[in-house]
Amino acid sequence: MLVPEQLDNQSFDEIIQQAQKQISLLTSDWTNYNPSDPGITLLELFSWYKEVQQYHLNALSREHELAYLKLLGAAPHDMKPATALLALTGEGKVEEKSIFLAEDIPFETTRSLAVCPSQVIFLGRNDAVITDFQKVQRAGGNLKFSPFLPEAPGAFCSFTLFFDNPLPAGVPLQLWFQLEDTENTWGEDQTFLPYVTFRGEYWDGEGYCPILVLEDHTQGFFHSGILRFQLPKEAQARWKEQGYPLRFVLEKGEYVKPPVIHDIRFNAVQVVQKETFSQIHSYHPSAAGVIELMPDTLSQTQRIEVYGVEGDRWIPLSWEAIRPRRVRLSASGFKTVQVVTWKKEADDLRRLGFANGIACFQIPLPQSDLLPNSLTLLVKEPDGNWYYWEQVDDFYSAGPSSRQYCLDTDSNTLRFGDGEQGRAPEGELLLLSWSTSLGELGNIQEGYLLPPSQAQVQEAACVSPAQGGSSPETTEACFRRVKQEFHQPKRCVTLRDFEQVALSTPGTYLKRVQAFVKNETPNQVFLAIETQGDNTALHPGVVENLKHAILPKVMINTKVNFLAPVYVRLKIYAQIRVKLQFFTQQEEIRRSLADYFEDPAIGFGSTLSKNALLDYLYAMPQVDRVEILELSFSGNHAVLRGGDIVLGEGCLPKLDRLNLTIQTDEN
């Protein structure tokens, strides 16, 4: 917890005592310091004034705290809704922004989905059935399936999903894969360059035909996510007795660590814990002024307004419905129009009231728990036109004509400027779009959600807990976050910066890393990296991701070289006496010695201490005493110093030969 800074923490007694000590330095004639002295009375008065001033200086409001955060380039996070994943069963279509209920908590679909009555029944690899997926699910769903295991480098590699019914063609479909996510370093501002490319195929009775992969949130089956795809118009055929196959073929690249699938769900859709009452979408009308509306539940309500945009001025346009989700505008000439659609419940909530042009005007909102980034506001000003007003955090940079407002989440009101910093509104206020959310209260456990009545869905299972929801961040929490971020490297200046950025790069599977420089090569940084698996050569995908993360942060004219580890081959001769009862555990001692040099704590360029190895051996319960211990190595990438081995920069130890003699006192 941060301790609030006190601008001046002197008490009244301390102030008056300090003032009295200054008297003798100014004059020797003043000798009476008693309260009856008029001069002391004046000192007490001004001391009281100073104490009062200190109180007001230290009494900082939230507005002051937000201003200080802005100087630091930060602001408290807004409320964030929770997200979850639903697996649907049934047949039909679920529109975007359809509401699923967890008791009385609404969850909204992020896109439309065609739900079909098909399920994955078998899993195969390289055209051979490997796993009965239905049997695994009936047993509790403890799946551990490796989809890509090539028999040899460059060999054909694929895995297949067999469905019990054919998949429909011409509509987007969604599969969710839960993979073994070994890394937890993903951030919203981080990107990952996939290591591999693959193609999707389906069986038409004569051979495999390509499918269209619309979105791949797994990023090449690297981590859990949704795969959105579509089959062409041709029909899907059955393959032998296993079902209707959907195959994914590895075309290019290789994994640092092969993926492992723990669960697969068909008809998967992401939902977010919010409810949209009114929304805005931008459209580009055709030459005939025709607009095809987005396929979502709000577009079906026939509560529609269309505006042509000219700068800040929004001009209402007349329209007529041609057919569902298609309208024709009565006036053309606008390249972009804004279409507002809303629910019936929002009919009376849209019109907020009237503003009279008074400075610092405030108006309450009809609903609470609003998501700040969902608000859109228009004001019908005295000239009879509607104007768009921008939402801002504060009015510090606003001028007298700035059409801006602030959302005060504490009081659930809209605040406007004073006429000098921010314009004072005058006219009718119309709220065009808004959504509500419960924030952290939307984080619920796994279970079943109630689907909307109009959707032909039999069941909606929440396959993972709804998580990620949070309340608005307090200023105190924001200051703590900013303080922590100060310790995170934003630029690669020191060698430690290079190492921290490399270790925090997602998808690299780094075990150890070392940054170093060489005197003979100025303006160059060498980055030695060790990943999981084979390190005889650098994995090109790892290097590309490291370049993507590091190079934009280096200083001008600095070259970064990525190096594979240089392994120093170690030779150990040891003679150990063990306790009699542990004589049968010789293999465990050998394995422990081998594992000692695989410890990530032994970094690049470390010193392998003979004494540290002795301490490690004596810590084993089997060891009675170590009679002989000798360390040596081959090659010229290390030096022997007093019995210890000092590795060169970019070098790691590798146990090559272990000559171990184990005896007991009985021998």
Image (cartoon, grey):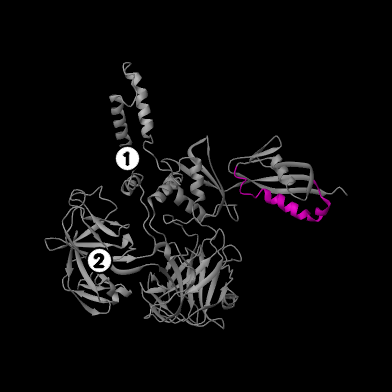
* Residue sitting nearer the eye, 128 or 362: 362
Picture residue at 44% right of the left edge, 61% below the top: 468
Picture residue at 59% right of the left edge, 44% below the top: 604
The residue tagged 2 is 432
The residue tagged 1 is 57
Which label lies toward us, 2 or 1?
1
Check if residue 297 falls in the magenta segment: no
Which residue lies most toward the front here?
36
Q: CA distance from mark 2 to mark 1?
A: 41 Å
The amino acid sitting under disc 1 is: Leu
> Where residue 496 appears, x then y in whole percent?
51, 42
> Where residue 336 appears, x then y in whole percent?
22, 65
Residues in magenta, as a range = 576-604
Query: Neighbour class for label 1 at 10 Å: few (<14), some, many (≥20)?
Result: few
Check if residue 579 falls in the magenta segment: yes
Which residue lies most toward the top here?
28
Mark earlier in primary sequence (2, 1): 1
The amino acid sitting under disc 2 is: Leu
Residue 449 as seen in the image, left or right of residue 45: right
Helix, strand or loop at label 2? It is: strand
* Residue sitting nearer the eye, 599 or 98: 98
Residue 295 as seen in the image, left or right of residue 167: left
